[in-house]
Amino acid sequence: MGPLVIISKGETMIAKRYIKTLKIYFILFYRRMKHKYGKEVVMQEDNASWYKAKEVRVFLKIQKIRYILWLL
């Protein structure tokens, strides 16, 4: 489990906001876990639309984040 982030009431998650959240709260956490546990560390996402956005996929690729995306 990664950092818990709660967005403000009335806001919705979109790809741009998700990338910002990843930059602020997740990337450093992921790198620490990867350093501690090795290359087998992966990020798991569900089927929410913002996870599947092309700009999110590109961002994660640039950051070298391994992930599991559920395509149901």
Image (cartoon, rainbow, N blue to C red):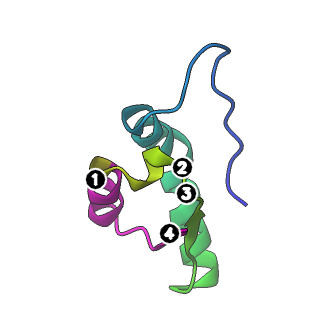
Q: Earlier in the sequence, mark 3 or mark 1?
A: 3
State the residue at coordinates (42%, 67%): 65
Mark number displayed over residue 48? 2
Q: Quadrant of residue 32?
A: bottom right
CA gap, disc 3 to disc 1? 14 Å
CA gap, disc 4 to disc 1? 14 Å
Other residues around mark 3 within 10 Å, as few (<14) / some (14–19) / many (≥20): few
State the residue at coordinates (52%, 32%): 13
Magenta-drawn segment: 56-72
Residue 35: percent from left, percent from top = 55, 76
The amino acid type of the residue labelled 3 equals: Asn
CA gap, disc 3 to disc 4? 6 Å
The amino acid type of the residue labelled 4 equals: Leu
Above or below, 64 relative to 46: below
Residues under numbered marks 3 and 4 in contact, where contact means CB atoms less than 8 Å apart: yes
Q: Which residue is mark 1?
A: 54
Other residues around mark 4 within 10 Å, as few (<14) / some (14–19) / many (≥20): few
Other residues around mark 1 within 10 Å, as few (<14) / some (14–19) / many (≥20): few
Residues under numbered marks 3 and 2 in contact, where contact means CB atoms less than 8 Å apart: yes
Mark number displayed over residue 47? 3
The amino acid type of the residue labelled 1 equals: Lys
Q: Which residue is mark 4?
A: 71
